[in-house]
Image (cartoon, rainbow, N blue to C red):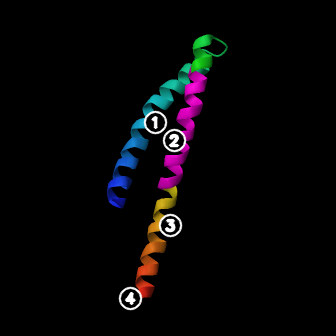
Amino acid sequence: MNKFLNKWLRKFHRWLVLPFIALLLTVIFTRGTPLGDNAQRIQAMLMIIMAISGAYLWVLPYWTKWKRKNVQVRS
């Protein structure tokens, strides 16, 4: 389960970048319009999702190293 989650979360995070960049450019160029306001709301939600998945991917190597160390100590 852990390998499956890691693999698909990495793919999800990478594919989420392209819509985020498009949305970011939309927000920048349509600032002050109704489209820009709606895009900004969507961008905020997308940023939270990207931050959570990115934080997990950033912590993952340290977590794996910690788990491996605990397994070696028990053996």
Q: Are marks 3 and 1 in contact (CB under 8 Å)?
A: no
* Quadrant of the rendering where the C terminus is positioned: bottom left
Local packing at callout 1 (Cα closer than 10 Å; few below 14, some 14-19, many 20+) is: some
Q: Which of marks 2 and 3 precedes in the sequence?
A: 2
Can you name the residue that lies furthest to the front here?
1
> Magenta includes 35?
no
User: Which residue carries the number 2 mark?
Assistant: 50
Are discs 1 and 2 less than 8 Å apart at CB?
A: yes
Residue found at x 60% / y 25%:
41
Residue at numbered disc 3: 62
**Residue bounds of the magenta highlight:** 39-57
> Which element carries disc 4, helix, strand or loop?
loop
**Residue positioned 48% across, 25% down in the render:** 22
Residue 56 falls left or right of residue 30: left
Question: Which kind of residue does numbered mark 1 sit on?
Answer: Val
Mark 1, secondary structure of its residue: helix
